Amino acid sequence: MAEVTLVGLRVVREVADTGSFTAAAEALGYTQSAISRQVAAMEAAAGTALFERFARGVRPTAAGAVLAAHAATVLGAVDTAERDLAGLRDRLAGRLRLGAFPAAGAVLVPRALARLRAAHPGLAVTIEEGATPALLSRLRSARLDVIVIGTGQGLPDYDLGELRQHPLVTDDLRVAVPSTHRLSRKARVTPADLSAETWIVGRGARGEPQFGAWPTLADPRIGHTTRSWTTRLGMVAAGLGVALLPGIAADSVPRGVTAVRVHDPAWHGRTATVLTAQAPSVAARAAVRALRRAAAALGDADPAAEPE
Amino acid sequence: MAEVTLVGLRVVREVADTGSFTAAAEALGYTQSAISRQVAAMEAAAGTALFERFARGVRPTAAGAVLAAHAATVLGAVDTAERDLAGLRDRLAGRLRLGAFPAAGAVLVPRALARLRAAHPGLAVTIEEGATPALLSRLRSARLDVIVIGTGQGLPDYDLGELRQHPLVTDDLRVAVPSTHRLSRKARVTPADLSAETWIVGRGARGEPQFGAWPTLADPRIGHTTRSWTTRLGMVAAGLGVALLPGIAADSVPRGVTAVRVHDPAWHGRTATVLTAQAPSVAARAAVRALRRAAAALGDADPAAEPE
DNA sequence: CACAGGGTATGCGAGAACCGCATGGCTGCT
DNA sequence: AGCAGCCATGCGGTTCTCGCATACCCTGTG
């Protein structure tokens, strides 16, 4: 027993419009033979003739005209469904887990999150801060979908095998100084300006990147050592010393702290790198794009095209 | 590239309602395996997941919920189309050509026509009166679809081979008398009452049924012979004589004519028979039904069931 | 922990459906 | 009569559908 099908309805509608199997075949990309059979199948399903056959074309019966009209309604509803689905498809849903080292977690990642939220309100994003080895481990075991780490001069060479790298930004390393400091009013300082300063440096677990003094200073004076990124900046604000500051976090310095650029020809910079699984999900890809855009908005984006 | 199908939409809707492939399979008469594949096909067509899979069943994604809602709309429109077509199918269109001998054409056939018109307004019915040999010939050459003839005592035995008989009515033969006649006031007369009467008989082409005097009268007095049925009744009204009258035409006598029943144990009656081609069309079958109902309403219907 | 039960995904294969190519039949025109 | 236009249908190659069987995962129970 034949059944009404969407293909059959498309054929009935087209034949009713054109009054010819041959014309409908051409319009729909079939042969006349296939159209004749589809009409026959719809006639079997309808239990009555849908078209009167003449030597030159066909004319719909009352039943044929009724079905063609209904076909337009049905096919319109299918189109609406498909359009709605396409709209939804372009909006992601589900979960995305992002991991980043603290400096990236200060400004870059929150801004990327805002972008993701605007474009995909149904996407649930979680952000974790952590040290690079921990982030790598969690990415590899699929407990994170995207991570942001720092790579380059002065940092360890991590094994990034089996992961996909998405270069993000060439970092502009700066110095955080007290806003009352003599250097805070300079647009740019030199290593010599920094040589007499007291440095507040970071301390963490073994293998973690260390925020020391300015990298090219021969013998910097270390005044304080603390683990907490937040504490370090608090100390700067209190006038206890100066500290290194990644450019991507420059916008997040607290009140009483000023970020100063350093002119040092001996310094080659660092890169903040986004890492995903080799075959990143659609959501992960969207996150990478959001991160790149946020970095560009920070004015330090590396314009390298991302391979897709 | 998978396409949205009506089967697929039914599956998506059922799975969204039941939250389980297995339950949907049972409800729709498929196996779980077929349901899984239909869902996969709809997901391919939609370009996104429609259901989240859990150990105990599934849950629609946002896209799945959207598509299930649209599926209800689409399938509802298809149901409406099918219902409308079924309604149309039960209403016939096209042409139907009916032939009948004059007595049947007087009341029976017009009443059947009224019934057909009410049930099938789109059916174009034409009625032709004629003598039985002519009607048979036209039926056999498919120039008529249904004919009504008289058969039985006193009438020729026609060759009805290759035609399909639909017995209709045992005729109640009457006598048409002038309304001023002494017999017009009797509920029922006898052959003896009729023996002295002047008869107005019919005359037609060779082989045609003849309307003579009362069939069982030994030596009736023929006063007038005329071919026209209408003229014959007119003569009765004018008091020129009496004439035979089939019961099925009793309701059509003109003013000034009264139909009187005759009590005659020697008279076995006649049958009005409907004839069609061996494989009658749907319209022809509808006409036969209408004729039988009209005859029943005339009170003289033979209750024999029509073989279908 | 082991096992049973519930539930989805997928390989394999048999049967059904689809539809292009080729051809037949009918009608209308010249 | 011949020809063109157009629908119907036989034949066969390809694709689709879906049941059966099996694999895998998760959850609950003893």
Image (cartoon, coloured by chain):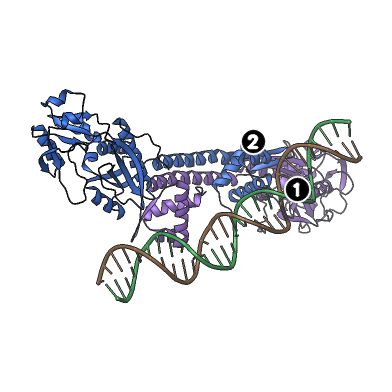
Chain colours: A purple, B blue, C brown, D green
Tag 2–tag 1 contact (CB < 8 Å):
no
Q: In this rendering, would A187 be left or right of B46?
A: right
Q: Quadrant of residue B298?
A: top left
Q: Are marks 2 and 1 on the same chain?
A: no
Residue, x 58% and y 44% (percent of image)?
Answer: A88
Residue A147, numbered label: 1
Callout 1: residue from which chain? A
Give SS at disc 1: strand
In this view of the protein, can residue A212 be seen by the observer?
no
Element under disc 2 = helix
Q: Where is residue C23? Give x, y as percent.
A: 44, 71
At 67% from the left and 41% from the top, the residue drawn is B21
Dot 2: few (<14), some (14–19), or many (≥20) neighbours within 10 Å? some
Question: Looking at the image, which is closer to me, A101 or D25?
Answer: D25
Say which amino acid is labelled 1: Ile
Residue A297 in the figure: left or right of residue A64 = right
Q: Which residue is mark 2?
A: B18
C-alpha gap between disc 2 and disc 1: 39 Å
Q: Position of residue B288 (x, y in %)?
A: 34, 41
| Image quadrant occupied by the C terminus of chain B | top left
Inspect the image, locate mark 2, and give the three-letter code of the amino acid beneath it: Thr
In this rendering, is residue B8 above or below B185? Answer: below
- x and y percentages locating residue B48 in the rendered image: 62, 47
Residue A101 vs A218, above or below: the answer is above
The residue nearer to you, when weighing A97 against A296, is A97
